[in-house]
Image: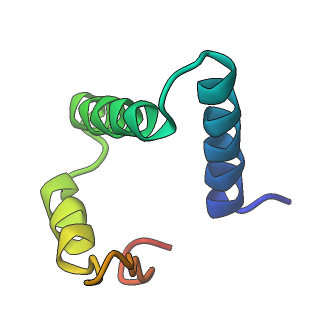
Amino acid sequence: MTSKYGLAKALLADLETGSKSAGLDAADVQEALLVSLVDLMKRSGEHRDLRGLLQYELDNLGGGGTYDLPRGGGHS
């Protein structure tokens, strides 16, 4: 059985491959995905604390170009 994070990582790998084959910058496509995903989550209404989730991730970004995205507390 695949975990939700395993599935997400596989989708991101496909996104990277698709970006390259389309001649697009992977970071630009990731940005578009993030914006689209946040919009979808807002419209679905199933994520009651979307702002809290996003703030949690922002607050946990590491310094020096290293990103530390710990999981837990409602993210499992």
- Picture residue at 71% right of the left edge, 62% below the top: 3
Quick check: 12 left or right of 6?
A: left
The x and y percentages for residue 29 are: 44, 31
Quick check: 7 left or right of 69?
A: right
Q: Tell which of 53 and 22 is nearer to you.
A: 22
The x and y percentages for residue 56 are: 22, 73
Q: Is residue 5 above or below residue 30?
A: below
The x and y percentages for residue 43 are: 23, 28
Quick check: 3 left or right of 35?
A: right
- Picture residue at 61% right of the left edge, 34% below the top: 15
Residue 59's image quarter? bottom left
Quick check: 40 left or right of 30?
A: left
Q: Tell which of 20 and 70 is nearer to you.
A: 20
Q: Residue furthest top?
A: 22
Q: Quadrant of the N terminus?
A: bottom right
Q: Residue furthest right?
A: 1
Residue 32's image quarter? top left
- Picture residue at 38% right of the left edge, 33% below the top: 28
- Picture residue at 61% right of the left edge, 45% below the top: 12
Residue 17's image quarter? top right
- How many badges with numbers are in the image? 0
The x and y percentages for residue 72 are: 43, 83
Q: Is residue 63 above or below residue 4?
A: below
